[in-house]
Image (cartoon, rainbow, N blue to C red):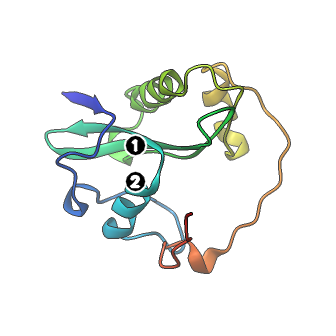
Amino acid sequence: MIKYQDHLKGVNAARLGGFFVGWLNPPNSAGHLKLLKGSDLAVLAVDGGRVVGFITAITDGVLAAYIPFLEVLPEYQGRGIGGQLVKRMLRMLGKAYMVDLLCDKELQQFYKKLNMFPATGMMIRNRRSQCGANIIRKK
């Protein structure tokens, strides 16, 4: 049975394998744990102690939030876990003025069902840093 949690208690790198499918230079499980800990908010889907899905958000706590990650393990996809993770995150973000995310065009239908709409944006992708080895310094 899938359980959802908005904390990292009991989560270690060993419970985070199998994510970032198709990435050229994915973070390892230790890097994955670091990105969860470094996020302002995270919601996890857990099955028997194993993390099977997660969503993260970065926010200024006033007006804006950005959702950089929503991932569900391939063998758990199609069960509504991703939708539950988004709904729970949006509830946590409350009445923020803006909640933004970037996704591939083929995923836009998924987010439209969750009351989001397409927008135009710009981005930079440094594939050499994709594994998370280069730490960004926070204030």
Place of residue 78 in the rendered image (x, y in percent of width and height, measured from the top left): 42, 31
Q: How many numbered discs, if any?
A: 2
x 15%, y 44%: residue: 49
Disc 2 packing (10 Å; few <14; some 14–19; many ≥20): many
Q: Is residue 7 above or below residue 89?
A: below
The residue at which mark 1 appears reads as: 54
Give the CA distance from mark 2 to mark 1. Answer: 9 Å
Mark 2 or 1: in front is 2
Disc 1 packing (10 Å; few <14; some 14–19; many ≥20): many
Left or right: 124, with 46 as reference point: right
Q: Secondary structure at mark 2?
A: helix
Q: Which of the 4 quarters of the picture holds residue 65? A: top right
The residue at which mark 2 appears reads as: 36
x 20%, y 47%: residue: 50
Residue type at mark 2 is: Leu
Sequence-first disc among 2 and 1:
2
Label annotation for residue 45: none
x 18%, y 27%: residue: 1
